[in-house]
Image (cartoon, helix red, strand yellow):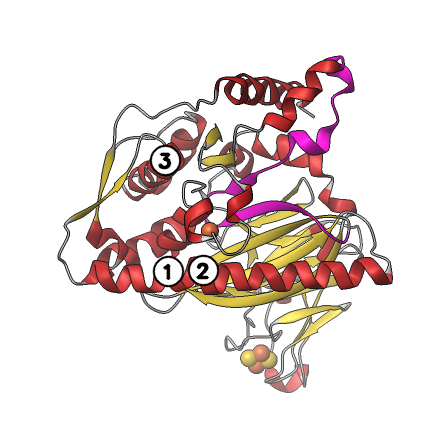
Amino acid sequence: MSKAQLIEMAKHNIAHAKQGTIEQADQVMQVPADHYFRKDRWEQEVDRVFKRLPLMLAMSCEMPNPGDYKSLEAAGMPVIINRNADGEIQAFVNMCSHRGAVIQPPGKGNTKKFICPYHAWSYNQKGELVGILSKDEFGDIDKSCYGLTPLPVAERAGLIWVILNPKSTLDIDTFLSGYDGLLAHFGFENWHHFDQRTLRGPNWKIAYDGYLDLYHLPVLHKNTFGPDFPNQTLYYEWGPHQRVTSPDRSMIELENKPESDWPTAPMMNGVWTIFPHVSIASFDNGGRGVMISQLFPGETPEESWTVQNYVLENAPSEEQKAMAKEQFEFLKFVVQEEDYATGLKQQKALRTGAKDHVLFGRNEGGGQKFHGWVKNILATEDDKLNDLFAQKKQAAAE
Ligand code: FES
Ligand SMILES: [Fe+2]
Protein backbone atom coordinates (compact mmCIF):
# COMPACT_ATOMS: atom_id res chain seq x y z
CA MET A 1 0.00 0.00 0.00
CA SER A 2 2.68 2.49 -0.99
CA LYS A 3 4.19 2.98 2.47
CA ALA A 4 7.41 3.81 0.65
CA GLN A 5 5.71 6.96 -0.69
CA LEU A 6 4.67 7.98 2.83
CA ILE A 7 8.27 7.56 3.99
CA GLU A 8 9.56 9.59 1.05
CA MET A 9 7.12 12.40 1.88
CA ALA A 10 8.10 12.25 5.56
CA LYS A 11 11.80 12.54 4.63
CA HIS A 12 11.01 15.44 2.30
CA ASN A 13 9.04 17.10 5.10
CA ILE A 14 11.88 16.59 7.61
CA ALA A 15 14.43 18.10 5.22
CA HIS A 16 12.27 21.22 4.83
CA ALA A 17 11.48 21.35 8.57
CA LYS A 18 15.21 21.37 9.38
CA GLN A 19 15.90 24.19 6.92
CA GLY A 20 12.67 26.12 7.53
CA THR A 21 11.93 26.08 3.79
CA ILE A 22 9.17 25.10 1.36
CA GLU A 23 9.12 24.39 -2.36
CA GLN A 24 7.96 27.44 -4.27
CA ALA A 25 5.98 27.45 -7.49
CA ASP A 26 7.79 28.98 -10.46
CA GLN A 27 5.84 32.20 -10.46
CA VAL A 28 3.04 34.17 -8.90
CA MET A 29 -0.14 33.28 -10.78
CA GLN A 30 -3.11 35.42 -11.75
CA VAL A 31 -6.66 34.02 -11.81
CA PRO A 32 -9.36 36.18 -13.44
CA ALA A 33 -11.66 37.48 -10.70
CA ASP A 34 -14.77 36.73 -12.74
CA HIS A 35 -13.99 33.01 -12.59
CA TYR A 36 -15.52 33.21 -9.13
CA PHE A 37 -18.84 34.74 -10.14
CA ARG A 38 -19.48 34.64 -13.91
CA LYS A 39 -22.58 32.54 -14.48
CA ASP A 40 -21.55 30.96 -17.79
CA ARG A 41 -18.18 29.97 -16.37
CA TRP A 42 -19.83 28.47 -13.27
CA GLU A 43 -22.33 26.52 -15.39
CA GLN A 44 -19.43 25.07 -17.40
CA GLU A 45 -17.75 24.02 -14.16
CA VAL A 46 -20.90 22.26 -12.94
CA ASP A 47 -21.41 20.54 -16.30
CA ARG A 48 -17.82 19.67 -17.15
CA VAL A 49 -16.30 19.14 -13.69
CA PHE A 50 -19.04 17.98 -11.32
CA LYS A 51 -21.19 16.14 -13.88
CA ARG A 52 -18.30 14.39 -15.64
CA LEU A 53 -15.75 13.48 -12.96
CA PRO A 54 -16.04 10.89 -10.19
CA LEU A 55 -17.35 12.46 -6.98
CA MET A 56 -16.70 10.97 -3.55
CA LEU A 57 -20.32 10.64 -2.47
CA ALA A 58 -20.17 8.17 0.42
CA MET A 59 -17.90 6.45 2.89
CA SER A 60 -17.94 2.64 3.11
CA CYS A 61 -18.50 2.90 6.87
CA GLU A 62 -21.80 4.70 6.21
CA MET A 63 -23.12 1.61 4.45
CA PRO A 64 -21.18 -1.48 5.57
CA ASN A 65 -23.91 -4.16 5.28
CA PRO A 66 -25.73 -5.80 2.36
CA GLY A 67 -28.94 -3.84 1.75
CA ASP A 68 -27.53 -0.58 3.16
CA TYR A 69 -28.25 2.38 0.94
CA LYS A 70 -27.70 6.12 0.81
CA SER A 71 -29.88 8.46 -1.20
CA LEU A 72 -28.73 12.00 -1.97
CA GLU A 73 -28.76 14.75 -4.56
CA ALA A 74 -25.42 15.78 -6.07
CA ALA A 75 -25.14 18.68 -8.55
CA GLY A 76 -28.88 18.33 -9.24
CA MET A 77 -28.75 14.56 -9.86
CA PRO A 78 -30.78 12.30 -7.53
CA VAL A 79 -28.60 9.28 -6.71
CA ILE A 80 -29.05 6.01 -4.83
CA ILE A 81 -25.91 4.19 -3.72
CA ASN A 82 -26.49 0.73 -2.31
CA ARG A 83 -24.64 -2.38 -1.23
CA ASN A 84 -26.23 -5.43 -2.81
CA ALA A 85 -26.61 -8.92 -1.33
CA ASP A 86 -23.12 -9.84 -2.59
CA GLY A 87 -21.61 -6.89 -0.70
CA GLU A 88 -20.87 -4.96 -3.88
CA ILE A 89 -21.51 -1.24 -4.14
CA GLN A 90 -23.79 -0.06 -6.94
CA ALA A 91 -25.12 3.37 -7.85
CA PHE A 92 -28.21 4.39 -9.77
CA VAL A 93 -30.08 7.44 -10.87
CA ASN A 94 -32.81 7.72 -8.24
CA MET A 95 -35.59 7.87 -10.82
CA CYS A 96 -38.42 5.49 -11.62
CA SER A 97 -38.61 3.97 -15.10
CA HIS A 98 -42.41 4.36 -15.17
CA ARG A 99 -42.79 8.12 -15.29
CA GLY A 100 -39.64 9.44 -13.68
CA ALA A 101 -40.63 9.96 -10.05
CA VAL A 102 -37.84 10.18 -7.48
CA ILE A 103 -37.99 6.89 -5.62
CA GLN A 104 -36.06 7.18 -2.40
CA PRO A 105 -36.06 10.36 -0.29
CA PRO A 106 -32.64 11.62 0.85
CA GLY A 107 -31.23 9.62 3.74
CA LYS A 108 -29.77 6.28 4.65
CA GLY A 109 -31.31 2.92 5.48
CA ASN A 110 -31.39 -0.78 4.71
CA THR A 111 -33.81 -2.37 2.27
CA LYS A 112 -34.24 -5.31 -0.09
CA LYS A 113 -36.50 -3.30 -2.41
CA PHE A 114 -36.83 0.28 -3.58
CA ILE A 115 -40.52 1.09 -4.01
CA CYS A 116 -41.62 4.12 -5.98
CA PRO A 117 -43.98 6.38 -3.98
CA TYR A 118 -46.05 7.25 -7.08
CA HIS A 119 -47.48 3.93 -8.37
CA ALA A 120 -45.48 1.43 -6.30
CA TRP A 121 -43.25 -0.04 -8.98
CA SER A 122 -40.44 -1.84 -7.19
CA TYR A 123 -36.76 -2.52 -7.84
CA ASN A 124 -34.44 -5.01 -6.17
CA GLN A 125 -30.95 -4.34 -4.77
CA LYS A 126 -29.46 -4.83 -8.22
CA GLY A 127 -31.72 -2.11 -9.60
CA GLU A 128 -33.83 -4.59 -11.57
CA LEU A 129 -37.51 -3.83 -12.02
CA VAL A 130 -39.27 -6.61 -10.13
CA GLY A 131 -42.79 -5.34 -9.47
CA ILE A 132 -45.42 -3.55 -11.57
CA LEU A 133 -48.69 -2.67 -9.85
CA SER A 134 -51.78 -4.17 -11.59
CA LYS A 135 -49.41 -5.73 -14.07
CA ASP A 136 -52.06 -7.25 -16.33
CA GLU A 137 -54.04 -4.04 -16.57
CA PHE A 138 -50.88 -1.96 -17.19
CA GLY A 139 -49.95 -4.00 -20.23
CA ASP A 140 -46.95 -5.92 -21.41
CA ILE A 141 -43.44 -4.48 -21.22
CA ASP A 142 -40.05 -6.17 -21.12
CA LYS A 143 -39.14 -5.66 -17.46
CA SER A 144 -35.47 -6.33 -18.16
CA CYS A 145 -35.33 -3.04 -20.13
CA TYR A 146 -36.76 -0.92 -17.33
CA GLY A 147 -34.41 -1.28 -14.39
CA LEU A 148 -32.87 1.73 -12.63
CA THR A 149 -30.23 3.53 -14.66
CA PRO A 150 -26.81 2.48 -13.33
CA LEU A 151 -24.04 5.01 -12.72
CA PRO A 152 -20.31 4.22 -12.83
CA VAL A 153 -19.13 3.58 -9.27
CA ALA A 154 -15.97 2.43 -7.48
CA GLU A 155 -15.24 1.66 -3.85
CA ARG A 156 -11.60 2.28 -2.99
CA ALA A 157 -9.81 2.93 0.32
CA GLY A 158 -13.12 2.87 2.22
CA LEU A 159 -14.54 5.67 0.06
CA ILE A 160 -17.13 5.51 -2.72
CA TRP A 161 -16.87 7.45 -5.99
CA VAL A 162 -19.76 7.87 -8.42
CA ILE A 163 -19.86 9.49 -11.86
CA LEU A 164 -23.13 11.38 -12.43
CA ASN A 165 -23.10 10.65 -16.16
CA PRO A 166 -24.49 7.14 -16.91
CA LYS A 167 -22.73 7.15 -20.30
CA SER A 168 -19.31 8.15 -18.98
CA THR A 169 -16.31 6.20 -20.29
CA LEU A 170 -13.91 7.77 -17.81
CA ASP A 171 -11.98 5.13 -15.88
CA ILE A 172 -12.25 5.92 -12.17
CA ASP A 173 -8.85 4.37 -11.36
CA THR A 174 -7.16 6.47 -14.04
CA PHE A 175 -8.77 9.54 -12.48
CA LEU A 176 -7.58 8.50 -8.99
CA SER A 177 -3.96 8.36 -10.25
CA GLY A 178 -2.86 6.01 -7.45
CA TYR A 179 -4.01 8.44 -4.74
CA ASP A 180 -6.41 5.84 -3.33
CA GLY A 181 -3.37 3.67 -2.51
CA LEU A 182 -2.19 6.43 -0.16
CA LEU A 183 -5.65 7.08 1.29
CA ALA A 184 -5.88 3.34 2.01
CA HIS A 185 -3.39 3.86 4.85
CA PHE A 186 -6.23 5.43 6.87
CA GLY A 187 -8.15 2.12 6.70
CA PHE A 188 -11.45 4.03 6.50
CA GLU A 189 -13.50 0.90 5.75
CA ASN A 190 -13.21 0.00 9.45
CA TRP A 191 -13.77 3.49 10.88
CA HIS A 192 -16.97 4.81 12.50
CA HIS A 193 -19.20 7.48 11.02
CA PHE A 194 -19.85 9.67 14.07
CA ASP A 195 -21.87 12.63 12.84
CA GLN A 196 -22.78 14.74 9.80
CA ARG A 197 -24.06 18.24 9.07
CA THR A 198 -24.46 20.53 6.06
CA LEU A 199 -23.22 24.13 5.88
CA ARG A 200 -23.95 26.83 3.32
CA GLY A 201 -20.86 28.43 1.86
CA PRO A 202 -19.58 30.67 -0.94
CA ASN A 203 -18.67 29.76 -4.56
CA TRP A 204 -17.27 26.23 -4.54
CA LYS A 205 -13.82 27.36 -5.74
CA ILE A 206 -13.57 30.05 -3.06
CA ALA A 207 -14.33 27.32 -0.52
CA TYR A 208 -11.94 24.81 -2.12
CA ASP A 209 -9.13 27.38 -2.33
CA GLY A 210 -9.37 27.58 1.46
CA TYR A 211 -8.91 23.82 1.91
CA LEU A 212 -5.66 24.00 -0.10
CA ASP A 213 -4.39 27.06 1.79
CA LEU A 214 -2.39 26.89 5.02
CA TYR A 215 -0.97 30.38 4.39
CA HIS A 216 -4.06 31.84 6.10
CA LEU A 217 -4.08 29.69 9.23
CA PRO A 218 -2.26 31.96 11.73
CA VAL A 219 -4.11 35.01 10.40
CA LEU A 220 -7.76 34.21 9.70
CA HIS A 221 -7.83 31.59 12.46
CA LYS A 222 -5.86 33.63 15.00
CA ASN A 223 -8.64 33.36 17.60
CA THR A 224 -9.13 29.60 17.23
CA PHE A 225 -6.48 27.08 16.19
CA GLY A 226 -4.28 29.23 13.93
CA PRO A 227 -1.54 30.29 16.36
CA ASP A 228 -0.39 26.66 16.65
CA PHE A 229 0.37 26.45 12.93
CA PRO A 230 3.07 27.85 10.66
CA ASN A 231 1.88 29.46 7.42
CA GLN A 232 4.24 27.35 5.30
CA THR A 233 2.84 24.65 3.04
CA LEU A 234 4.15 21.57 1.27
CA TYR A 235 2.04 20.09 -1.53
CA TYR A 236 2.17 16.54 -2.89
CA GLU A 237 0.18 15.65 -5.99
CA TRP A 238 -1.31 12.55 -7.59
CA GLY A 239 -3.05 13.67 -10.74
CA PRO A 240 -5.40 16.48 -9.65
CA HIS A 241 -5.49 15.27 -6.02
CA GLN A 242 -3.24 16.98 -3.50
CA ARG A 243 -2.05 16.38 0.01
CA VAL A 244 -1.41 19.62 1.88
CA THR A 245 0.84 19.74 4.92
CA SER A 246 3.40 21.91 6.71
CA PRO A 247 7.06 21.35 7.39
CA ASP A 248 6.74 19.74 10.82
CA ARG A 249 9.66 19.82 13.24
CA SER A 250 8.06 17.10 15.38
CA MET A 251 8.70 14.70 12.46
CA ILE A 252 12.46 15.09 12.94
CA GLU A 253 12.41 12.66 15.88
CA LEU A 254 11.37 9.89 13.47
CA GLU A 255 15.00 9.84 12.36
CA ASN A 256 15.90 8.16 15.65
CA LYS A 257 14.17 4.98 14.44
CA PRO A 258 14.71 2.74 11.41
CA GLU A 259 12.41 3.80 8.57
CA SER A 260 10.60 0.48 8.68
CA ASP A 261 9.41 1.38 12.22
CA TRP A 262 8.08 4.85 11.34
CA PRO A 263 4.42 4.90 12.44
CA THR A 264 1.84 5.56 9.76
CA ALA A 265 -0.44 8.04 11.60
CA PRO A 266 2.00 10.99 11.88
CA MET A 267 3.01 10.43 8.25
CA MET A 268 -0.67 10.90 7.26
CA ASN A 269 -1.12 14.31 8.90
CA GLY A 270 -2.29 17.47 7.17
CA VAL A 271 -5.15 17.76 4.70
CA TRP A 272 -5.79 15.22 1.94
CA THR A 273 -7.89 16.83 -0.77
CA ILE A 274 -9.72 14.80 -3.40
CA PHE A 275 -10.32 16.78 -6.58
CA PRO A 276 -12.70 18.46 -7.17
CA HIS A 277 -14.61 18.61 -3.93
CA VAL A 278 -13.35 16.78 -0.85
CA SER A 279 -11.03 17.59 2.02
CA ILE A 280 -9.92 15.11 4.70
CA ALA A 281 -8.36 16.73 7.76
CA SER A 282 -7.01 14.79 10.76
CA PHE A 283 -7.71 15.55 14.42
CA ASP A 284 -7.02 13.86 17.71
CA ASN A 285 -9.75 14.61 20.19
CA GLY A 286 -12.05 11.86 21.35
CA GLY A 287 -9.64 9.44 19.64
CA ARG A 288 -8.06 9.71 16.21
CA GLY A 289 -10.59 11.20 13.82
CA VAL A 290 -10.97 12.98 10.52
CA MET A 291 -13.38 15.56 9.22
CA ILE A 292 -14.32 14.61 5.67
CA SER A 293 -15.85 17.64 3.94
CA GLN A 294 -17.78 17.11 0.69
CA LEU A 295 -18.34 20.30 -1.24
CA PHE A 296 -21.11 20.76 -3.82
CA PRO A 297 -22.08 23.73 -5.96
CA GLY A 298 -25.40 25.31 -4.94
CA GLU A 299 -28.10 26.92 -7.06
CA THR A 300 -26.02 29.92 -8.14
CA PRO A 301 -22.29 30.72 -8.61
CA GLU A 302 -22.34 32.34 -5.17
CA GLU A 303 -23.55 29.36 -3.21
CA SER A 304 -22.12 25.99 -2.23
CA TRP A 305 -23.08 23.30 0.24
CA THR A 306 -20.58 21.43 2.37
CA VAL A 307 -21.41 18.13 4.01
CA GLN A 308 -19.13 17.79 7.01
CA ASN A 309 -18.64 14.23 8.28
CA TYR A 310 -16.81 13.41 11.49
CA VAL A 311 -15.36 9.92 11.26
CA LEU A 312 -13.53 8.17 14.11
CA GLU A 313 -10.91 5.43 13.87
CA ASN A 314 -12.37 3.49 16.80
CA ALA A 315 -15.84 3.18 18.28
CA PRO A 316 -15.87 5.95 20.91
CA SER A 317 -16.45 5.51 24.66
CA GLU A 318 -19.03 7.83 26.26
CA GLU A 319 -16.24 10.19 27.26
CA GLN A 320 -14.74 10.13 23.77
CA LYS A 321 -18.18 10.80 22.27
CA ALA A 322 -18.43 14.00 24.29
CA MET A 323 -14.94 15.06 23.19
CA ALA A 324 -15.64 14.21 19.55
CA LYS A 325 -18.89 16.18 19.69
CA GLU A 326 -17.05 19.18 21.09
CA GLN A 327 -14.37 18.89 18.38
CA PHE A 328 -16.99 18.67 15.63
CA GLU A 329 -18.81 21.75 17.01
CA PHE A 330 -15.51 23.62 17.09
CA LEU A 331 -14.87 22.72 13.44
CA LYS A 332 -18.33 23.97 12.51
CA PHE A 333 -17.53 27.31 14.12
CA VAL A 334 -14.13 27.58 12.38
CA VAL A 335 -15.47 26.76 8.92
CA GLN A 336 -18.76 28.67 9.14
CA GLU A 337 -17.73 31.75 11.13
CA GLU A 338 -14.16 32.13 9.92
CA ASP A 339 -13.58 30.45 6.51
CA TYR A 340 -17.02 30.70 4.88
CA ALA A 341 -17.96 34.05 6.49
CA THR A 342 -14.78 35.46 4.95
CA GLY A 343 -15.48 33.73 1.62
CA LEU A 344 -19.04 35.12 1.39
CA LYS A 345 -17.75 38.67 1.87
CA GLN A 346 -14.81 38.01 -0.48
CA GLN A 347 -17.06 37.00 -3.37
CA LYS A 348 -19.29 40.02 -2.83
CA ALA A 349 -16.20 42.22 -3.06
CA LEU A 350 -14.94 40.37 -6.16
CA ARG A 351 -18.29 40.91 -7.84
CA THR A 352 -17.81 44.68 -7.74
CA GLY A 353 -15.37 44.20 -10.63
CA ALA A 354 -12.87 46.58 -9.04
CA LYS A 355 -10.08 44.01 -9.53
CA ASP A 356 -9.74 42.01 -12.70
CA HIS A 357 -7.65 39.24 -11.20
CA VAL A 358 -6.58 37.67 -7.91
CA LEU A 359 -3.18 36.22 -7.05
CA PHE A 360 -1.80 32.86 -5.97
CA GLY A 361 1.73 33.25 -4.65
CA ARG A 362 4.74 31.04 -5.16
CA ASN A 363 3.92 29.64 -1.70
CA GLU A 364 0.38 28.76 -2.86
CA GLY A 365 1.29 26.16 -5.45
CA GLY A 366 -1.67 23.97 -4.47
CA GLY A 367 -4.16 26.66 -5.47
CA GLN A 368 -2.21 27.25 -8.67
CA LYS A 369 -2.45 23.57 -9.61
CA PHE A 370 -6.15 23.42 -8.69
CA HIS A 371 -7.04 26.30 -11.00
CA GLY A 372 -4.81 24.83 -13.71
CA TRP A 373 -6.68 21.52 -13.52
CA VAL A 374 -10.09 23.21 -13.65
CA LYS A 375 -9.01 25.14 -16.74
CA ASN A 376 -7.67 22.03 -18.49
CA ILE A 377 -10.72 19.93 -17.65
CA LEU A 378 -13.07 22.59 -19.00
CA ALA A 379 -11.11 22.52 -22.26
CA THR A 380 -11.11 18.70 -22.58
CA GLU A 381 -13.71 16.82 -24.62
CA ASP A 382 -15.38 13.75 -23.09
CA ASP A 383 -13.41 11.22 -25.15
CA LYS A 384 -10.09 12.79 -24.10
CA LEU A 385 -10.67 12.79 -20.32
CA ASN A 386 -8.93 9.45 -19.77
CA ASP A 387 -5.86 10.78 -21.59
CA LEU A 388 -5.88 13.94 -19.50
CA PHE A 389 -5.79 12.02 -16.21
CA ALA A 390 -3.40 9.38 -17.53
CA GLN A 391 -0.83 12.15 -18.03
CA LYS A 392 -1.12 12.88 -14.30
CA LYS A 393 0.60 16.24 -14.24
CA GLN A 394 -1.49 18.85 -15.95
CA ALA A 395 -1.13 22.00 -13.91
CA ALA A 396 -0.76 25.09 -16.00
CA ALA A 397 -0.93 28.77 -15.34
CA GLU A 398 -4.19 30.49 -16.24
S1 FES B 1 -43.49 6.95 -11.49
FE1 FES B 1 -42.75 5.33 -10.30
S2 FES B 1 -44.34 3.91 -10.27
FE2 FES B 1 -45.10 5.51 -11.47
FE1 LIG C 1 -9.39 28.04 7.06
Cα distance in 3D space between marks 3 and 1: 18 Å
Residue 234 pos. (x, y %):
47, 29
**Which residue is denoted by mark 1 in the rendering?**
342
Can you tell me which quadrant of the image ligand 1 is in? bottom right
342 vs 325, left or right, is left
Can I make out residue 67 in this image?
Answer: no
Residue 117 picture quarter: bottom right
Which amino acid type is marked by label 2? Answer: Glu
The image shows residue 203 at horizontal and vertical percentages of 35, 59
Q: From the Cβ of disc 2, is ligand 2 less than 8 Å away?
A: yes
Say which element carries label 2.
Answer: helix
As drawn, 368 above or below 22 = below
Span shown in magenta: 257-286
Task: Please name whichever residue, 327 or 69, is drawn nearer the observer in this view of the structure.
Answer: 327
Mark 2 to mark 1 CA distance (whole Å):
6 Å
Work out whether residue 93 or residue 1 is closer to the camera in this orientation and state it.
1
Residue at screen point 57% across, 32% down: 179
On screen, residue 103 versus residue 195, left or right, reads left
Could you tell me the amino acid type at mark 3? Glu
- Nearest to N terminus: mark 3 or mark 2: 2
What's under tag 1, amino acid-wise?
Thr
Q: Which residue occupies 44% across, 37% down?
A: 231
Instruction: Tell me the quadrant of the picture where the C terminus can be found.
Output: top left
Could you tell me if the residues under marks 2 and 1 are in contact, i.e. CB atoms within 8 Å? yes
